[in-house]
Image: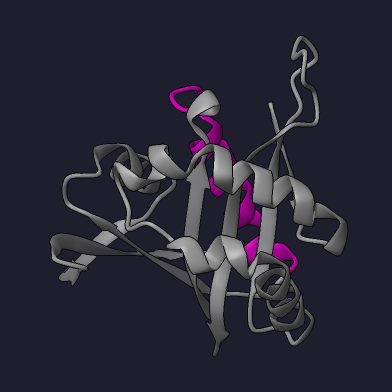
């Protein structure tokens, strides 16, 4: 159903198109990236690749791999492990509107959790989301994350999750 690919330089155009196409959709549940993100995208993408090369982050694109998919190989989301330190990292993900509600986020998070343990040598992951983002909370809980605290994200109440790999 989904395939993760480690972020590469040649993903830049597809990632930018994905972010532009889903900007209004994402704004409904998370803070907007702002115009500067799009205007300076090439530099931002290069910086992400440098962070990944340094081992402090692991970025992935989510591709649709269904046999019946007309636009097979389409970029439908992103899932990342950031701030890698002392065997831990923070998980972040976003799935485009066209793929929402199909289990894509749950499958991608499950796969990146497997990679965290087997490929990246991590022992635990954290994640945060707002209290009102039921879909994100469900994805995390389905993948073995448990609530470990409360926090504020922007001006909204949120929760912190933790999961051993």
Relative to 136, 13 lies left or right: right
- Residue at 76% of width from left, 27% of height from top? 65
Position in image of residue 132 (x %, y %) = 17, 45
User: Dividing the picture into quarters, in which one does residue 121 lie?
Assistant: bottom right
Image height of 50 relative to 102, above or below? below
In the displayed structure, does residue 94 sit left or right of residue 152? right
Q: Which residue is at 21% across, 62% downward?
A: 159
Q: Is residue 117 visible?
A: no
Of residues 69 and 139, the one drawn nearer to the viewer in this rendering: 69
x, y percentage for residue 146? 29, 57
> Main SS type for the magenta part?
helix
Quarter location, residue 43: bottom right
Q: Number of callouts in the render?
A: 0
| Residue shown at 29% from the left, 45% from the top | 29
The spot of residue 80 in percent (x, y) is 58, 62
Q: Which segment did they paint magenta?
A: 100-119
Q: Is residue 121 above or below residue 13?
A: below
Residue in the foreground of this view, choosing between 118 and 58: 58
Q: Residue at x 68, y 26 (%)?
A: 1
Q: Is residue 73 visible?
A: yes
* 134 relative position to 141: left or right: left
Magenta span contains residue 41: no
Q: Nearer the viewer, residue 84 or 19?
A: 19
- When the figure is inspected, residue 33 is found, relative to residue 13, above or below; the finding is below
Farthest residue toward the right? 10
Residue 118 in percent (x, y) is at: 71, 64
């Amino acid at each position: 159903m989904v395939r993760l690919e480690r972020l590469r330089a040649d993903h830049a155009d597809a990632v930018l198109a994905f972010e532009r196409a889903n900007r209004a959709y994402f704004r409904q549940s998370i803070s907007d990236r702002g115009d500067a993100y799009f205007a300076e995208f090439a530099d931002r993408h290069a910086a992400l690749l440098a962070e990944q090369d340094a081992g402090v982050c692991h970025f992935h694109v989510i591709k649709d791999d269904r046999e019946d998919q007309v636009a097979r190989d389409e970029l439908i989301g992103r899932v990342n492990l950031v701030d890698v330190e002392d065997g831990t990292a923070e998980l972040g993900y976003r799935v485009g509107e066209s793929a929402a509600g199909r289990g894509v986020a749950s499958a991608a998070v499950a796969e990146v959790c497997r990679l965290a343990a087997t490929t990246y040598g991590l022992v635990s992951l954290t994640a945060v989301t707002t209290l009102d983002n039921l879909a994100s909370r469900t994805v995390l809980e389905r993948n073995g994350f448990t609530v470990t605290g409360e926090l504020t994200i922007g001006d909204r109440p949120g929760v912190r999750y933790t999961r051993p790999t």
